[in-house]
Amino acid sequence: MNGNRRVRAILASLFLVVALVLASCSQTMMRLETGPRAWVGGPPDGSEVPLGMVSAMCHAYAKAGVSHIELWVNGVFANRAPNTTDPSAEYFTASLTFETTGPGSYVLHCWTYDQDGGSAQSDPVTLRVTGEEPTPTTGEEEIPTASPTSTEAPPTATVPPPTETPIPPTSTRVPPTSTPRPPTATPVPVRILSFEVTKSQINDGECVRFDWVVQGSPSAIFFDDEGVTSPDSRERCPTATREFELRAELNGQVADRATLTVVVAPGDTTGPVIGRWAVSPGLISWDQYDSCTPREVTVNAYNVTDPSGVAAVKVIYRMKGGSWQSKGMNQVQTGMWSAIIGPNDLELSLNPPVTAGATAPGTNSLECYVQAKDDFGNSTDSNWRTVTVQYCHIVR
């Protein structure tokens, strides 16, 4: 029984270890999916390396695809490796070198940049550079120490004490315990800072302008496979939906790239949509009994829309039996247009005829409809409406 308990305890311990390992792997994968990552693969943190050229292994991960890797030493840009093999690859590794200028501590960081403009910095790796710098010569010959029998002391201004190391000029050497000075001229990495288009969706026949800003000193810039220098913009009139690429190169290699897609809608061949329209109050009346005070008809059109823009809206009208007339409608708010038809706009056909000096009432029919045009000249006519008009007429 004791042996069985011991076996069960061992199996339970092994199961717990496996579960912890799987959980750790799962958490690692979850971290990998959250965004760009960078880490230094070598040399290990705390390593000692000799003075001279040092190679660092930078690893990168980006869900959107790795654009390039940069190596920074003591907070200063040192080297760069673009991902020209497969820009959509999520993993990318490069060996980047830098030259140490003297013994001391060097702090390394790897930076990952993805295709969407995201970036991530690795944990720092500190290296200890060992070795001795060559002692600079002053061009003066050292004077040997005087012999015991000599009565003349050596010049103190040119001969250092025999027990001390000669001190080089401070302008050409950094003390071994200090951090090496960064180079005075730091190269600026070539990078596309912005790439924009005036409109990302257009109608057939429209044109757009592309503008961009590239930092650094690229050896060449290509927009839509056209070599460009200045100005930093170009105009295009695409006839179909397509992608436009901006590419910056350095010494024949792609340093950075960006793309924009312009959607071209089919050509507009139809007129605007007239949601609804109404004639209000539906009656024009000249008072038959008092002073023939006129009233007016208001015509409203609602929800008048067109993808290419509404250029004009008008009401077409006539008195029954008369000639057609038109009157422009004013836009009173987005999609709504309005016009007023008054006595001066009508051609009245009186029935029956009246004699001089008499006041005669009458009726007639006002026929009307709404017409809307877009920016391409396409027009749409609404349905017809008929309104009964009452009036009185005073013969002078």
Image: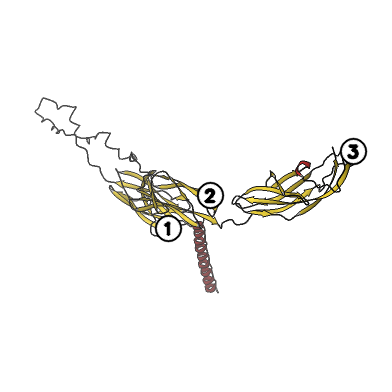
Q: Residue at x 50, y 66 (%)?
A: 18
Residue 199 is tagged as 2
Residue type, numbered disc 1: Pro
Secondary structure at badge 3 equals: loop
Secondary structure at badge 2 equals: loop
Q: Is residue 172 left or right of residue 270?
A: left
For marks 3 and 1, the one nearer the N-term is: 1
Query: How many C-alpha atoms fall within 10 Å of the one at disc 1: few (<14), some, or many (≥20)?
Result: some
Residue 87 is tagged as 1
Residue closer to the observer: 384 or 343: 343
Alpha-carbon distance for marks 3 and 1?
87 Å
Secondary structure at badge 1 equals: loop
Query: How many C-alpha atoms fall within 10 Å of the one at disc 3: few (<14), some, or many (≥20)?
Result: few
Alpha-carbon distance for marks 3 and 2?
62 Å
Residue 198, placed above or below residue 7 = above
Q: Is residue 4 visible?
A: yes
Q: Is residue 335 visible?
A: no
Mark nearest the camera among 3 and 1 is 3
Residue 246 is tagged as none
Q: Residue at x 52, y 67 (%)?
A: 15
